[in-house]
Amino acid sequence: MSILIRGARLRRLDGLYDVLIEDGKIAEVSTSIKRGADETIDAGGRLLTPSFSDMHFHLDSALTLGDPRYNESGTLIEGIEIWAEKKRGITVEDVKNRAIRAVKMMVSYGTTRLRTHADITEPRLATLKGLLEVKKEMKPLIDIQVTAFPQDGILTEPGNAELLEKAVEMGADNVGIIPHYELTREDGVKSISVAFDIAQKYGRDVDGHVDETDDEQSRFLEVVAAEAIRRGYEGRVTAGHATAMHSYNDAYAYKLYRILRRAGVTVIANPLINIHLQGRFDTYPKRRGMTRIKELLKHGVNVALGHDCIRDPWYPLGRGDMVQALFMAVHVGHLMGYQELRDSFDLITVNAARALRIESEYGVERGKRADLVLLDARDELEALALQRPPLLVIKEGRIIVRRSNAEAEIVVDGKKERLEFV
Ligand code: FE2
């Protein structure tokens, strides 16, 4: 099966390009391709980008909103309490059904790579089993990595560290941590060491929840970076949330940028959830509670985004659209300069590919894997302004989502007009 996309805009290039896809790969990119293909698609000057990556998500809790109850306080802690009630009787089938629905929503919005957490402090490991099956079954649509996530802490209960290791033995791709949720600062530090021991033993990456709090005293990110450096894990660690960084003093933040860069740690911001859950103990002024995306990038630290949750105990909204998550990020992070908006798509594309160490196969270039999204917009600004679902999503050279564009008609004094947003 070959596909020829004609007249597409590509990021950071002027003019229009044709892109030929053959055998799952990009065979040619040029201003005019003479060869034909099994299917030809006219992009009409729209933006063709590599497909999106969601680097931090909780598939096991997705779409449980209101079950067993709603989060009325809007706090992270109430969310954890509700999830603890829900997961007591959770079944593999329940996890799978919801996760597959959520995955299809995400794919329809252009995400074909996903890192999901599976809560392994549920002792029957039903969440992990369910998500490992979803990973396999959804492979034609999306590449999933499952992180063994110790939601209730590694050292808070006897047996959690063993569950973490067992989860990795069962096939989890990455080892998780949540040091700010351990009982003491010392336990937090120790939990990081336990997780790195397991990661090293099984050759896995570390993918943590780190400093997801407004507490400026929460400083586990430096410990994570130091472990990465000491154990030769540079480039193999992601730190999700890191919201406490919002509240650090600038001198400390400056020190942190340096060691994060040296450790090759990728920071994953989750703007939709961060703006909702953080700042909850403030009166006024209220902190934004998102990590310092702009400054981290400026200091050479890799940053990517996660959606984190869809309609669950922590976040009541969401449709699995990474452009919507990016829309929140650029607002909260003051990334609204013209060039900043153009560059912001790196957060859901190439920066994630760097964290996943798949740069050699990622991009709209000859020889790379044909994982692409045709957006209903001419450039990044229009994509963010309109947030229209993509017209095409392509994975490994196969069209997995197809939409007609969302034009609207308006009737003025009985006369129909076609609305032009682009
Ligand atoms: Fe999370």
Image (cartoon, helix red, strand yellow):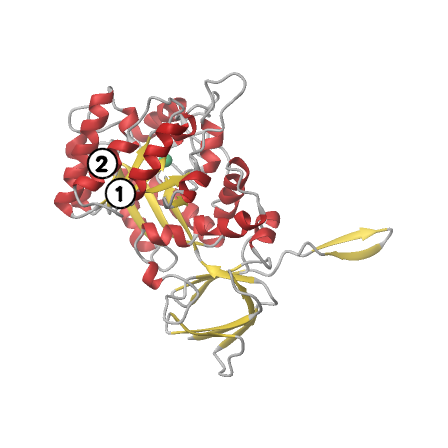
- Drawn side of residue 209 relative to residue 328, left or right: left
Coordinates of residue 290 in the picture (x, y in percent): 45, 33
Q: Element type at marker 2? A: helix
Q: Which residue sits at x=34%, y=53%? A: 354
Which mark is drawn over residue 311? none
Q: Element type at marker 1? A: helix
- Drawn side of residue 293 relative to residue 211, left or right: right
Coordinates of residue 359 in the picture (x, y in percent): 34, 59
* Residue ID for mark 1: 263
Coordinates of residue 174 in the picture (x, y in percent): 24, 44
Q: Amino acid at mark 2?
A: Ala
Q: Does the Cβ of the disc 1 residue fall within 8 Å of ligand 1?
A: no
Instruction: Specify the farthest residue to the front.
Output: 251
* Residue ID for mark 2: 226
Where does the N terminus fall, quadrant-wise? bottom left
Distance Cα–Cα, label 2 vs label 1: 7 Å
Where does the C terminus fall, quadrant-wise? bottom right
Q: Amino acid at mark 1?
A: Ala
Q: Is residue 405 above or below residue 195?
A: below
Quadrant in which ligand 1 is drawn: top left
Q: How crowded is the residue under tag 2: few (<14 C-alpha within 10 Å), some, or many (20+)?
A: some
Q: Which residue sits at x=42%, y=25%? A: 247
Whether residues under marks 2 and 1 lie with C-beta atoms below 8 angstroms apart, the answer is: yes
Instruction: Specify the farthest residue to the top.
Output: 283
